[in-house]
Amino acid sequence: ERKAPPEQLPIVLQVLLSQSHRLRALVLLGRFLDMGPWAVDLALSVGIFPYVLKLLQTTAPDLRQILVFIWTKILALDRSCQLDLVKDSGHLYFIRFLDSPQVPSEERAMAAFVLAAITDNHPKGQAACAASGLMPICLNHLAA
């Protein structure tokens, strides 16, 4: 069943451009994406992808958890983002997140899922993650 996109969805995407409201907009977007595959489809159809891809360049620690959650939702449904994530070095964001000892294990698991999706049947993603030191990080988590 296709549902009409909420009228507010394009507005939430525009609010992502405002640094002072970005966290709240991302939380709202995350709640929307959590409603199911239809919500992810609608968000992608109104142009969420370039916004959240660009936000992976941010170093703001308060955005890290919600961005990982959003990317988990997107990649669970649509693996076509792999190429752009690797091309823009987005995989590095998730590798750093996975390697952060202060991040709870549930959130590191989401980052691991995103990295698995980036590498799934994608040789360039596999090579980029391997070259970025993902394997030693994963092995450290297994040993812990």
Image (spheres, rainbow, N blue to C red):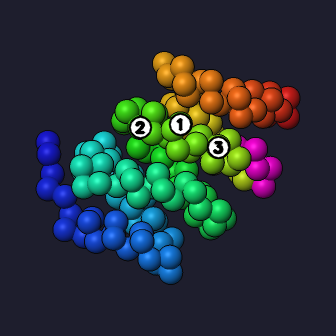
Amino acid type of the residue that numbered disc 3 sits on in the rendered structure: Leu
Q: Position of residue 20 (x, y in %)?
A: 50, 81
In the picture, measured across the screen, residue 95 lies left or right of residue 53, that is: right
Residue nearest the observer in this picture, 105 or 29 = 29
Residue under label 3, please give it: 92
Q: Quadrant of the N terminus?
A: top left
Residue under label 2, please give it: 81
> What predominant SS class does the magenta segment belong to?
loop
The reply to whether the magenta stretch includes residue 24 is: no
Residue 68's mark?
none
> Vertically, is 73 above or below 115?
below
Q: Earlier in the sequence, mark 1 or mark 3?
A: 1
Residue under label 1, please give it: 86
Q: Position of residue 26 (x, y in %)?
A: 45, 65
State the extent of the magenta-drawn residues as a range: 98-102
Distance between the alpha carbons at the discs numbered 3 and 2: 15 Å
Residue at 68% x, 41% y is 95
The reply to whether the magenta stretch includes residue 99 is: yes
Q: Residues within 10 Å of mark 3 (few under 14, many from 20)?
A: many
Residue at 59% x, 62% y is 58
